Image (spheres, helix red, strand yellow):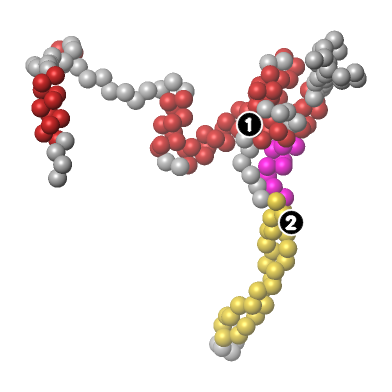
Amino acid sequence: MPAPKGNKYALGNQGGRPPIYSSVEDLATNIEAYFTYCEGESHEEERTEKKKQKNPTTKKMETVEVKTMVTVWDRDPERPTWTNLALFLGFESRKTLHDYSQKEEFSYPIKRALTIIESIYEDALMSQGPTGAIFALKNLGWTDSKEVTGKDGGPIQHSHTLTPEDVAAFSAKFNKTY
């Protein structure tokens, strides 16, 4: 069934949906806005608290009012992610963000933003103990396998090969019902 008349995404419209960003500056500005958004929004408020303290002259306990400035979060900070960056920029998926990064003019700001996010992930991994670092290193191609060898670095020699009867006897010994 053909697309209805007037459909701007129909065949023959010479290129499909128009690009979301036509200038690198607009994209870079919105990427910066995303990282600013992730910082959250807050304001300072003056709070008055009543505290008991010893009066230095009378040496008696008195209740005094202490004024302090506190930060009140209107919107909590959040950790930047690739997916949220894609959604913030108006893309429907991370793949579209990746496709934009393949265009030469948009490559630098997108790859830089993704590298910033990757750096935040690495910091989070490192702060949680060695497990995160091991995970990250494995994803970068490192391995932690052991290589076991026999005498003189050769293969291990087996002295006995199990037969089906050996396996059946072993299974019978450990599959008893108690």
Judging depth in this view, the residue of 86 and 54 nearest the camera is 86
Q: Looking at the figure, which quarter contains the N terminus?
A: top right
Residue 7, placed above or below residue 32: above
Task: Give the residue displayed 12% in from the left and 17% down from the top.
Answer: 163
Task: From the viewer's perspective, tell me whether residue 67 is left or right of residue 142.
Answer: right
Our reading of the magenta stretch's main secondary structure is helix
Report if residue 35 lies within the magenta region. yes
First in residue order: circle 2 vs circle 1? 2
**In-front residue for pair 71/30:** 30
Label 2 crowding class (10 Å Cα cut-off): few <14, some 14-19, many 20+? few
**Badge 1 element:** helix
- Tag 2 residue: 43
Residue under the image location 77 percent in, 27 percent down: 27
The image quadrant of residue 39 is top right
The stretch of residues the image draws in magenta is 32-41
Query: Residue 41, how many percent across, how many down?
Result: 72, 50
Location of residue 88 in the rendering, given as x and y in whole percent from the top left corner? 73, 35
Residue 138: which numbered mark, if any? none
Report the residue that reaches farthest toward the right.
6
The percent position of residue 36, horizontal first and vertical second, equals: 72, 41
Please tell me whether mark 2 sits on a helix, a strand or a loop: strand
User: Which numbered tag is attached to residue 82?
Assistant: 1
Q: Is residue 108 left or right of residue 11?
A: left
- Quarter of the C terminus within the rendering: top left
